[in-house]
Amino acid sequence: VQLVESGGGEVQSGGSLRLSCAAFGFTFSSYWMYWVRQARGKGLEWVSGINFAGDREYYADSVKGRFTIVRDNAKNTLYLQMDSLKPEDTALYYCARLNRATGVDYWGVGTLVAVSS
């Protein structure tokens, strides 16, 4: 199993980025998938999640209305469209697979998002 994030970078406040997470080595369409972030010196924050079919979504209050999670099961890829970015969105963003029996069992290495004011 491998999760590979991409799409991070530096952007000014109010800008947009789209993160991607390519999944390998498992049946992608069988798992809920999440984006989780960690700002420097802070704990993990569950940003957004999406169900198997892509028709149920979860968003943290801090990103509701600004971020959109999408999955393409044909391409085994998870996306996070981030609009109206704020400096407080600066963090390392991880893609994670949820195992319903054991919790999150695989993580990517993360992609860094830096938002300047």
Image (cartoon, rainbow, N blue to C red):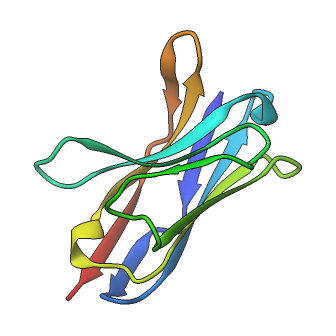
Q: Please tell me in which quadrant of the rendered image residue 31 appears.
A: top right
Quadrant in the picture for the N terminus: top right
Q: Pick out the residue farthest to the left.
A: 41
Return the x and y of residue 116 as percentages of the image width and height.
23, 84
Which residue is found at the position 74% from the left and 48% from the top?
54
Residue 8, placed above or below residue 30: below
Q: Quadrant of the rendered structure where residue 53 is? A: top right
Q: What residue is shown at x 60% (from left), y 39% (from top)?
A: 33
| Residue nearest the viewer, comparing 22 with 73 | 73
Residue closest to the eye, 63 or 3: 63
Please give left or right for residue 76 compared with residue 59 in the image.
Answer: right
Viewed as shown, does residue 51 lie left or right of 72? left
Q: Is residue 76 above or below residue 116?
A: above
Q: Position of residue 91 (x, y in %)?
A: 29, 60
Residue farthest along the top direction in this orientation:
101
Tell me which corner region of the image, top left, top right, bottom left or bottom right, holds residue 100.
Answer: top right
Report x, y in % for residue 109: 44, 43
Closer-to-camera residue (80/9): 80
Q: Is residue 112 above or below residue 9?
A: above
Using the image, determine if residue 15 lies above or below residue 49.
Answer: below
Query: Which quarter shows the C terminus?
Result: bottom left
